[in-house]
């Protein structure tokens, strides 16, 4: 076999290997709907270390679609999704990525139009199990207290962190975070957190602790 034939054989082998190799996983397309306003009411149970919440979210379509994709902690089980008219809608977790939940609308929505959905969900948030950030405890609820960070996706987010929260459309009201036992330092920390929330115009959060 000549040197030229050897080179051609190597090139052909390389092409065959590339053709037979598994395709790289492609990143999912950006969501067709982005959250435009939040109203979240949540209850934290320190005994069961769980959260139960109802989140009313306004979405704005940036592409024609009938599927709303949100990000929600895999531990949080969604039991109901309702439209603005109070009708129950179909939904399912993404089997490839359980962080994503897809809501099926009755019909496609035009670009720029708005959709309001109300999510009812609950589940344990005790440690870093199934954390959206692998190995990082982004949310935890226990007898000593709790913390809920945005990366935990403890309420429905869209395209986080690429898309910032819609600050200009969010209520500045925040009830703060209640704990069963506090010392003076924690009271000061909570007061500072409330002020920070007001400055950043956080979503309207109604939090209670059992």
Image (cartoon, rainbow, N blue to C red):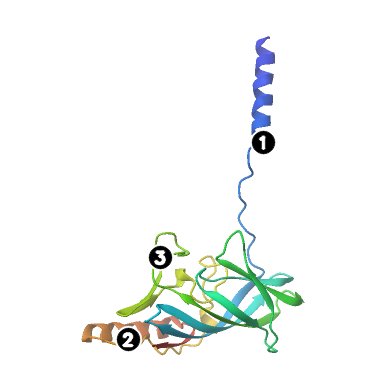
Q: Residue at x 45, y 72 (%)?
A: 150
Q: Which mark is residue 20?
A: 1
- Give the residue furthest to the right: 107
* Residue 136 lies in quadrant: bottom left
Residue at (66% x, 15% y) in the render: 6
User: What residue lies at 67% left-to-right and 36% top-to-bottom?
Assistant: 20
Image location (x, y in percent) of residue 72? 54, 71
SS label for mark 3: loop
Residue 92: percent from the left, percent from the top?
64, 70
Residue pointed to by mark 2: 179
Q: Residue furthest front?
A: 48
**Which labelled disc corresponds to residue 128?**
3
Mark on residue 8?
none
The quadrant holding residue 99 is bottom right
Asked whether the residues under the numbered discs 3 and 2 touch, taking CB atoms below 8 Å apart as contact, a structural biologist would say no
Residue 55: x %, y % from top left: 55, 83
For numbered disc 2, what is the local secondary structure? loop
């Amino acid at each position: 076999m000549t040197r030229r034939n050897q080179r051609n054989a190597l090139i052909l082998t390389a092409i065959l290997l590339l053709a037979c190799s598994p395709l790289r996983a492609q990143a999912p397309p950006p969501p067709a709907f982005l959250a435009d306003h939040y109203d979240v009411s949540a209850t934290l149970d320190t005994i069961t270390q769980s959260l139960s919440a109802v989140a009313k979210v306004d979405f704005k379509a940036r592409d024609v679609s009938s599927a709303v994709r949100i990000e929600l902690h895999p531990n949080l089980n969604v039991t109901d999704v309702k439209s603005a008219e109070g009708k129950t809608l179909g939904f399912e977790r993404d089997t490839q990525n359980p962080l994503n939940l897809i809501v099926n609308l009755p019909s496609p929505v035009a670009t720029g139009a708005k959709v309001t959905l109300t999510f009812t969900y609950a589940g344990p948030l005790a440690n870093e199990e199934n954390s959206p950030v692998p190995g990082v405890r982004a949310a935890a609820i226990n007898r000593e207290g709790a913390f809920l960070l945005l990366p935990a996706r403890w309420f429905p987010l869209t395209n986080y962190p690429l898309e910032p929260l819609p600050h200009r459309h969010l209520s500045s009201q925040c009830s703060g975070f209640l704990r069963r036992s506090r010392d003076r330092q924690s009271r000061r920390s909570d007061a500072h957190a409330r002020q920070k929330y007001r400055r950043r115009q956080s979503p309207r959060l109604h939090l209670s602790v059992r």
